Image (cartoon, rainbow, N blue to C red):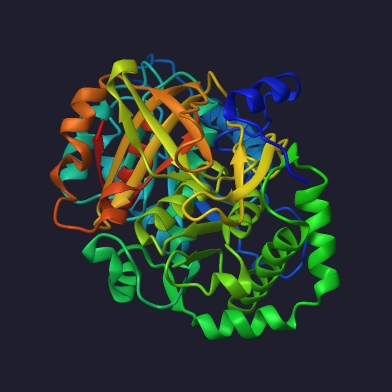
Amino acid sequence: MSISLNRREFVAITAAGTIMLSGQPGGRQTLAADNENWPQLPRVKIHKVYAGRTGHAWPKPKFKPHDEVAKFERHLAKVEQKLGDVKFVGGELVQNPQQAAQVAAKLKDADGVLLFHLSISTVKEMQKIVDAGKPTVIFSQPFSGHGWMDVNQWRKAGKKIALLATSDYDEIVQAVALLRVPVRMRQSRMISVPGELTGTKPACSFENVKASLGTEVIPVSYQRVIDTYQTIEPKEAETEAEQYWIKPAQKIVEPTRDEIIKSARLYLAVKKIMQQEQAQAVTIKCLGGLPIDKLGYPCLTFSKLDDLGMVGVCERDIDSALTRLMFNYAFGIPGFITDPLFDTAKNAVIHAHCTAPTKMNGPNSKRAPFIIRTHRDDDKGASLEVELRVGQIITCAKLVNLDTILVSTGKITEIPDFEDRGCRTQITTEVKDAQKMLDNWGAGLLDEYGWVAQLHRVVFYGDLVQSTKHMADLMGLKVIEAM
């Protein structure tokens, strides 16, 4: 089927069917159960500790810390159920440094610590827990005291701490979700096709990635992809293409049915290799590398992996792949990796690429409307034009040099249509100061690297800047805003 349709017309015909998606940052990260062979990671073990005394001025002299503990315990039972992949242990109330030291000795088996600051005169107790060296979230509601003043000193000493100084108990859900990220990164495996990586120099070393984040990168040859592709039955690929792409598509413009089936067959081959390697992510050098004439473009492969809660990344971009993996674990949502460009007349950054998730709110959300197109660079293969949500607040982020996250926010204001120029999926995002962002692109950290490292960014739904800062605190990373 072939139809001429520009981007604005696409938005017009699909706007009526656009529904707010259901995923929420910090919710349970769920893989769509299309196959039982996806790797299953163990539950993250979070040790709860409460630091509180009675008989002191704050919160009040007659404060009863045991009653406060009981209140939080009821709330944490709901948090554990909501997240689904964490297990709370401990729950001790420490009221002097000796008790705190005894609890600190138990923390070696925990993946992270959730420390509740309940009252004044507990800084020594809190420091004993922090000194155990585990990633630690400190929850300090108003009038618990002034222990929050010591957190920056502990961070300067190298401790990995996120501070929640808030009255909102719901923020605990997101904070605990962030505690998952360091351990999940250590448990993760990423396939690179072929072995060599593209990105910032520190991240292009398998050994550096393993040492910094714990993630194992596994090289896979083009030949293995080709051989695995041949093991996929054409009928299975046809069923996959029909069910996930052809029937749900709003339109199919240039690609033939056979081209879409070929892309579906490549997806099934990549999925098979990932499951064999027990990998959560894959990045492929597609342009100028993958034998596209034999296998087709991997644009649909990446999109479906993203929809399932896995990570699929084009152009062998290790920085964006690691960013996607971290944000997947933190927020349970995929990201749209883009080639940004500027329109200062609209105070805007345009984000564009030929592959995008159709479930930007996570695996359990409704798919966005999409058109199947050719890959724009050469008008071959099958790629996607996904209608991302106008009016949506977004976060744009990227981990660079394995130690710094560049982050900014914006708002999707339109789907651009410059005579159908540029990559297939596009959004215009209004930002705080487009000219300043243009002048300081990359914050001076990327000038020596190639165009993929300098250019690519990842767009996520939602304003995730503060949570990104908390995540960075728990991982010992730096954050630079408004790159």
Image label count: 0
Front in this rendered view, residue 22 or 28: 22
Q: Is residue 15 visible?
A: yes
Q: Residue at x 30, y 25 (%)?
A: 120
The residue closer to the viewer here, 321 or 125, is 321
Q: Looking at the picture, tell me which residue is in the foreground, 279 or 344.
A: 344
Query: Front-most of 309 and 15?
Result: 15
Question: Where residue 474 appears, x then y in whole percent?
Answer: 35, 47
Q: Position of residue 407 (x, y in %)?
A: 32, 36
- Position in image of residue 314 (x %, y %): 47, 59
Q: Quadrant of residue 294?
A: bottom right
| Residue 257, placed above or below residue 385 | below
Residue sitting at 26 percent across and 44 percent down? 127
Q: Is residue 72 left or right of residue 57?
A: right
Position of the C terminus by quadrant: top left
x then y, percent, for residue 267: 66, 65
Q: Horizontal placement of 307 versus 26: left or right?
A: right
Q: Is residue 92 depicted above or below 467 in this figure?
A: below
- Residue 20 lies left or right of residue 457; in this view the side is right
Q: Which quarter of the picture shows residue 370?
A: top right
Q: Is residue 5 left or right of residue 452?
A: right
Evaluate whether residue 48 shows in this view.
Answer: no
